[in-house]
Image (cartoon, grey):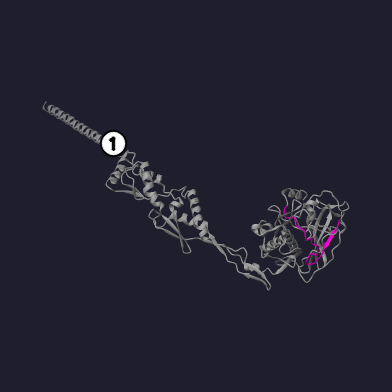
Amino acid sequence: MEKRGMKKGTGAAKSTAKVKIMIVIGAVFAVAAIIGIISWVLWFSNTKEMRDVLDVDTIYPNILANGVNIGGMKKEDAIKKLQRDAQEPFDQNEITFIIDDEEVKFTYKQFNVKLDIEGAVEKAYNYAREGSVEERYELYERLKINDVYSFDIDYLTDEGNLPEETVTTIRSELEKGLKDKVYIPPKDATLKKDGSGFTTTAEENGRELDLDRAVDTVVEYITIGEGDGLTIHTPTKEIETPVKEIQANVTKAQLSQVKDVIGKYSTKYSGSGSSGRVINMRVAASRLNGKIINPGEVFSTNECFGESTPENGYKLAGAYINGKLDQDYGGGVCQVSSTLYNAVLRAELDVVERSNHSLTVGYVPRGFDATLAGDYIDFKFKNDTSVPVYIESGLTGNQVSITLYGKEIHSPNRTLEFKNTFTGGAYKTYKEVYQDGKFIEKVYLSRSVYKNIKDNGNGVPVEVKLDESTTAKAVVTEAATEPVSMPTTVNNESQKNKKKSETGKNEQATNDNVTSNSQEAHTVTEPTPPDENEGVNSNIGTDTNIDTDMNENFTDDLIVSPNDVDSINSSM
């Protein structure tokens, strides 16, 4: 009985112990829970306080961009401050170009180089705004105790490069500030003809700004900088101005090849040296004298002679104006242009533009004249050789004489004969080429129609009597015969094939109206010799000077109206 009682007491004690343990554990959990709740409340309270500090619309304190403190500022205020305290000082940075002993300075403001102010403000605003609240707050607390965050402002770029408008501004400013200071024009070699031959002087090359290199140098310096990068404190940069050489168009070596007479021609004139017509011819010839036409260059007679005005030295003289005789400045210069035309034909240069007069002239055969008028009728030719062509021109012994010098490219014993034929109311001009006296080819040159010449119906040119009140003095009265004796250029001057000219048939006068026609000279090789029976054929021989009668009252057709030009071109 005693043993059972002992067991019963032991079980009760164990049960009581378990209860106590459970109570203790419960108490621990309760305490832990209370502590947890208290901690969470404290954490939540602290986090809210941190968020309240961090969640502001201003830049955190002590943040510097290019040394400018924009901490505690709103974005728009920070932008204004950086524009004033960062961009404006930055604008004063200079780049200096050295030209010889001269300095030319440019500022960044001139170049329109911009700092990325808005990007810098965004960068400052976003500092310490990523990561946990605690991490952000820790950075914030450091800023408050003067642990500053500082950075350099980047350039305003477009996909990593300076904006196109900035590069354009740099180019414009460099060109405006350097181009004229750098430029030295080249000097062509010169050639002068005197009694003993030609004298040449050497060329001098010039220089000009290498604008592309200058722009690249500035862009590279601004965007790359030196050392740790370009900032507003970068010292002035000095650059030797990049230049490139300008080659002279004409060199002494080129001009040294000008030795041969390649074409020459002379025409006679009447009248005293003090007459307006002769003065005009002398002015035109003097402007022509010494001209050099480079290979590939097209020569304009109008540009050479200049505008026919008193200011340019021209006098009043007789001139054809709309097919009528009148007085005008520059009357007579067409004799010089016609003489030049015939010299060019003998040099076998490329005739680009040529028009005949509206009425016949007496100083060259029909079909071999070249008129000028304003800026709409010109005589132009091209130097289609590889050597410069030098023009010698002047008035001597009542003759206008023009000689062209260059390099003879044709074979020896080559001779030329120039002929005109009259058919269908027009004069057609040709060049016949002979080698060692043997016919080689016939080349068509031009077609010319004159108002005062008409076909009598049998292929014979007759002179039309125009209005005597206006044109009587301008008509060549001895119209029974073609002008004769045109010079022929040969490669070897000792070889000249002189031929007598054929006499044309008598012309019968008529009052029928005749229109004027002109055709620019084109080189068209014909395979057969000319038809000697085609109209009136004038075989124009090899004399160096034309042998024609010159009417003292004769004037050339300097002025032609645009209506006449239309008429001329309508039948081309």
In this view, the residue in front, 31 or 85, is: 85
**Residue at horizontal 86 percent and vertical 59 percent from the top:** 504
| Residue 537 is covered by the magenta coloring | yes
Residue stretch in magenta:
535-559
Q: Secondary structure at mark 1?
A: helix
Q: Count the marks: how many?
A: 1
Q: Is residue 293 above or below residue 24?
A: below
Q: Looking at the picture, how far across and down is residue 513, in whole percent? A: 82, 48
Q: Looking at the picture, how far across and down is residue 428, in whole percent? A: 81, 56
In this view, the residue in front, 458 or 278, is: 278
Examine the rendering and report whether any part of residue 476 can be seen.
yes
Q: Is residue 470 left or right of residue 132?
A: right
Residue at the far right in the pictured view: 458
Mark 1 lies on residue: 48
Q: Amino acid at mark 1?
A: Lys
Main SS, magenta residues: loop
Q: Mark 1: few, some, or many residues within 10 Å (few <14, many ≥20)? A: some
Q: Looking at the picture, how far across and down is residue 464, in whole percent? A: 83, 52
In this view, the residue in front, 357 or 278, is: 278
Q: Looking at the picture, how far across and down is residue 374, in whole percent? A: 69, 53
